[in-house]
Amino acid sequence: MTDENYDAIVIGTSQGGRFLPVDLAKAGRKVALVERGRLGGVCVNTGCTPTKTMVASARLAYQARRGAEYGVRIGPVSVDLAAVRERKRAMVAGARENYASHLAQDGLDLIEGEAHFTGPKTLEVVLTGGGTRQITAPVIVIDAGTRPRPLAASGLGDVRALDSTSIMELDELPRHLIIVGGGYIALEFGQMFRRFGSEVTIVQRAARLMMIEDEDVSDEVAAILRDDGITVMTSSTPVRVEQADSRVEVTVRTPDGEQELEGSHLLSAIGRIPNTETLTPEVAGIRLNDRGFIEVDDYLETSVPGVYAMGDVKGGPAFTHLSYDDYRILHSNLIGHEKASTRDRVVPYTVFIDPQLGRAGMTEREARSQGRAIRVAKLPMNAVIRAIETGETRGFMKAVVDTNSGQILGCAVLGAEGGEIMTIIQVAMLGKLPHSAMADAVFTHPLLAEGLNALFATLDT
């Protein structure tokens, strides 16, 4: 088979892969874009867009049930999960169509099929419609993404276990949803379905939820979920799963011995694994780490010169905005001939539970493990006037500050619009403002941001 030659090949169409091939084509390159599934990758199809759309429905149900607290009589609240699903599907379809409309670009060849390496710079694509194509280019960018990690437990082969994709296709509300996992996927779906009306139990192997967070943060998150009526089990491991008619029976090993859980549905939310097996990167000499993710340097280049990886497939935090920053780096280097890198970038994120958890920079634990001299500012949300007025007083604001320089090293905002408030602190970090600048700033009254005055003023007491 004769090779088809391109200037660049991009494999996958997640957040970074959505833009880079278009920009390369506009720059006069002949580009092949290979996609084996739906255009838009995880974010558009099974990640951010659909989950946050459903989170919005769940929050509205929660607010409606609280109406009496605000003097508003609404009556009984019920959730039509099929209608929630259709709203989600419409949102996804619109986002996908919007992306597809941008691919009509001269010099860009969309190839629908699954690619695998046959050499350092050559790929064979098994076409979705049948047949194969052999393509080659001096520049190849891998944006293949990840997929849910399957749950391993005795008897699971006979059990209908959901993952973060299939759970969003339910049209009837689970009676009792058992979730295995304690990260942000587990927490977002757990609170979502609790607000829809399901009984929810979260089973977490580790000693705490969200082990990457400081202990006070994860403890407060657990308290909020329990306050919402969710059962949270930590230091607990599922050892056996059985299907009994419409019931799922899970045997969990806990610090107090084995415990039997009976639910209607089981969700596995124990992380994600990279889509690298069928890509056969080892044939090209591309190094993987011990978890199967592609290794890259600060410029996102793999062990093979001219072959790059971006987004979730290279490991590290799996966030859409990080994938987009990868795109900016590759755009600068491949089109602008610059030397942009991932060094020293501050990676923020938000967990879309309610109240939100916004995080940026170092945790207190990380700073102390590095031997830094730090001070910690902390303010409960019930001390923020706007939070009191709106009845959203759960959580707290926290910032880690360098004792000597006064620079803000990191923050965690668990509160109403926590992601938005975190972003204000992140901008201050980017601008290297001392904490005193935040304490003395004039913020509009009464906004949630006004709480930053009081947060950083605690360091002066």
Image: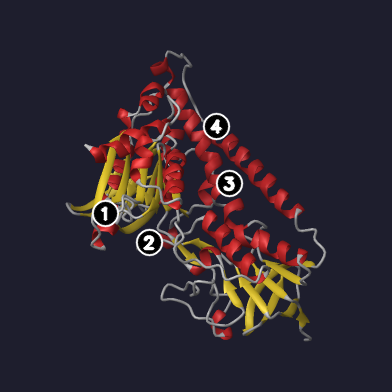
Return the residue at label 1. 404
Q: Is residue 255 left or right of residue 413?
A: left
Quick check: marks 4 and 1 in contact, CB under 8 Å? Answer: no
Return the residue at label 3. 49
Q: Is disc 4 placed on a helix, strand or loop?
A: loop
Mark 4 → mark 1, Cα distance in angstroms: 55 Å
Task: Tell me which label, 2 or 1, sits earlier in the chain.
Answer: 2
Query: Mark 2 or mark 1, which is nearer to you?
Result: 1
Q: Is disc 2 placed on a helix, strand or loop?
A: loop
Mark 2 → mark 4, Cα distance in angstroms: 32 Å
Amino acid on which disc 2 is placed? Gly
Task: Give the residue drawn at x 60%, y 62%.
Answer: 327
Amino acid on which disc 3 is placed? Thr
Task: Give the residue drawn at x 33%, y 32%.
Answer: 381
In front here: 212 or 413?
Answer: 413
Amino acid on which disc 4 is placed? Asp
Task: Tell me which label, 1 or 3, sits earlier in the chain.
Answer: 3
Quarter of the figure that contains the C terminus: top left
Task: Tell me which label, 3 or 4, sits earlier in the chain.
Answer: 3
Query: Mark 4 or mark 1, which is nearer to you?
Result: 1
Spot occupied by residue 157 in the image (x, y as percentages of width and height): 43, 62
Spot occupied by residue 115 in the image (x, y as percentages of width and height): 65, 74
Mark 1 → mark 3, Cα distance in angstroms: 42 Å
Does 111 sit above or below residue 233? below
- Whether residue 128 is visible here, answered yes or no, is no
Task: Give the residue drawn at x 53%, y 52%.
Answer: 165
Return the residue at label 2. 155
